[in-house]
Image (cartoon, rainbow, N blue to C red):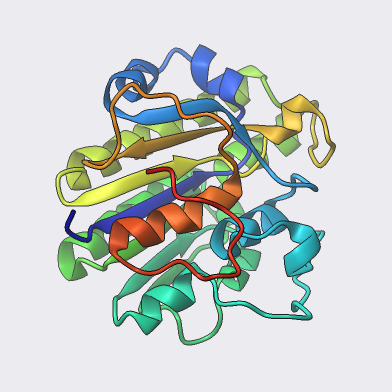
Amino acid sequence: MSSQKVILVTIDGLRPDAFLTCGHPMVDYVRKNASYTVKGSSVLPPVTLPAHLSIFYSVPPQRHGTLTNTYTPPVRPIDGLFEHIRHAGKTTAIFYGWEQMRDVSRPGSMTYAEYVKSKVLENADTYLTDRALLCIREHEPDFVFLYLVDVDECGHRDGWMTESYFNRVRIALDNLKRVLDACGDQYTVIVSADHGGHERTHGENIPEDMTIPMFFFGEMFEPGKEPEGLSLLDIAPTVAKAMGIPADPDWEGKSVF
């Protein structure tokens, strides 16, 4: 298998039951065209920055050391996904609407990056998707990380599983479909939530917070297959294998394929 370019999309705060019941055509599209699970596992605590550091460093929060949304430098640093991509001589891009997301990589690992404060835009997810697609058209980076924040912010403001929350879920899925339509022939696309939520919060060891959806589109994934036992720690090894980059020996996750 030749090495692939990869787009990773995370939809902050997306519950799998919200995905399944939101009424968006992407539900059937995922079932037919992706390997997917609606029983994936977040990490403890199921909080945005600890979860994303676990995505990119493939270790649990107790090992990377960040247990809240305030970054804590690890006592024993390991190389994460961005660092491995840089060492392989490949290019990266990140588009994000929450400033703390800058901590998912070390300085010097980004080729292209754009941050916009989500609260200054009515629809940060659509803006960031526009910017990511423009960068892909103009520069074709080897790895793109697109972080969609509006679903989580709506959950905190109005509550998980409210109608406004479902509306933000549908907008996020609209943007995911745009990415697949524009780039699905050239890129492997991996999609995951970081955590779920309940009422107007998250962070507890309960199914509503810990269970997440994960979707895998690309030639190495079997459409309609539902792999079991997946967690956020499996994303970095999967991206690395798709890109033909060795996984770090300290990573604890496994490749999905």
Figure check: 56 above or below 224: below
Residue 222 visible, this orientation:
yes
- Quarter assignment of residue 30: top left
Which is more toward the observer, 186 or 160? 186
Residue visible at 18% across and 53% down in the picture: 1
Figure check: 198 above or below 192: above
Residue visible at 42% across and 78% down in the picture: 110
- Quarter assignment of residue 224: top left
Which is more toward the observer, 125 or 45? 45
Figure check: 235 above or below 84: above
Residue 159 visible, this orientation:
no
- Residue 12 falls left or right of residue 205: left
On the image, the x and y values in percent for residue 255 come to: 45, 49
- Residue 190 falls left or right of residue 122: left
- Residue 163 falls left or right of residue 7: right
Residue visible at 72% across and 46% down in the picture: 43
Furthest residue to the bottom? 108
On the image, the x and y values in percent for residue 92 come to: 35, 71
Residue visible at 43% across and 48% down in the picture: 9
On the image, the x and y values in percent for residue 109 come to: 45, 81
Quadrant in which the C terminus appears: top left
On the image, the x and y values in percent for residue 233 come to: 59, 52
- Quarter assignment of residue 170: top left
Which is more toward the observer, 172 or 71? 71
- Residue 229 falls left or right of residue 86: right
